Image (cartoon, rainbow, N blue to C red):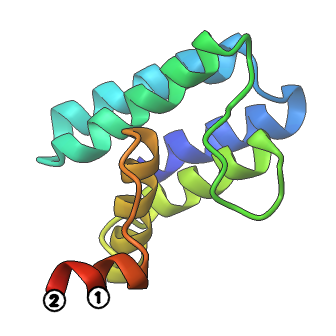
Amino acid sequence: MNNRIDQIKKTLAKEGISEKVITQMKELREWFKANLNEPGYVKMIRLAYENIEENSGDYTFLYLEEDDGKSNLEYFLDLLGEYQNKYNKEELQEIRNLMEGIVPETEEEEETAGE
C-alpha cells in the first residue's frame, strides 16, 4: 500500500494532478477494497478522485491552511499511508466529513444542543 501511495506522490511531484494520478488513485482504491476491511477509506479515495475529475483536474477539498489542492491531496495520501495511527484516524474522519459535506458543530452549537 505504501508503495502505491509513494508512486502517486512521485507522480504528483513530477506532473501535478493529472490523469495518471487519477488512475493510480483508482488502483489504490481497488487495493484497499481487496486487502483491507476499511470501506470508509475506500469511499474517501473514490470521493477524492471523483472530485478531481469533476473539477477539471483540481482537487478542491481544502483542509490545510494552504489553498493548494496538490498539497491537500498529498497530505490526504500521507494520512492514508498511516491510517491505523489514532491521530490520523481522527483527521481522516474530519476529512471524510468535509468530503461528504458534513459541517462540524462549533463548541457554541454543542453547548446549545446540550441545554
| Mark 2 element type | loop
The residue positioned 76% from the left and 26% from the top of the image is: 17
Label of residue 111 in the image: 1
Label of residue 31 in the image: none
| Mark 1 element type | helix
Could you say which is closer to the camera, residue 19 or residue 69?
69
Q: Name the residue under label 2.
A: 115
Could you say which is closer to the camera, residue 61 or residue 107?
107
Q: To which quarter of the image does residue 5 belong?
A: top right
Report whether 104 appears left or right of 73.
Answer: left
Q: Where is residue 4 in the image (x, y as percent from the top left)?
A: 51, 39
Seen as rendered, the residue at the extreme left is: 37
Q: Where is residue 12 in the image (x, y as percent from the top left)?
A: 77, 35
Estimate how packed mark 1 is, as few (under 14), some (14 to 19) or many (20 or more) residues with alpha carbons within 10 Å: few
Report whether 67 appears left or right of 36.
Answer: right
The residue positioned 34% from the left and 69% from the top of the image is: 89
Report whether 72 appears left or right of 37.
Answer: right
Numbered-mark total:
2
Does 100 sit above or below residue 96?
above
Q: To which quarter of the image does residue 112 belong?
A: bottom left
Between the C-alphas of marks 2 and 1, the distance is 7 Å
Does 103 sit above or below residue 55?
below
Image quadrant containing the C terminus: bottom left
Q: Are marks 2 and 1 in contact (CB under 8 Å)?
A: yes
Give the residue type that dot 2 points to: Glu
The residue positioned 16% from the left and 86% from the top of the image is: 114
Give the residue type that dot 1 points to: Glu
Could you say which is closer to the camera, residue 21 or residue 97?
97
Does 113 sit above or below residue 79?
below
Report whether 57 appears left or right of 30.
Answer: right
Estimate how packed mark 2 is, as few (under 14), some (14 to 19) or many (20 or more) residues with alpha carbons within 10 Å: few
Does 84 sit above or below residue 23?
below
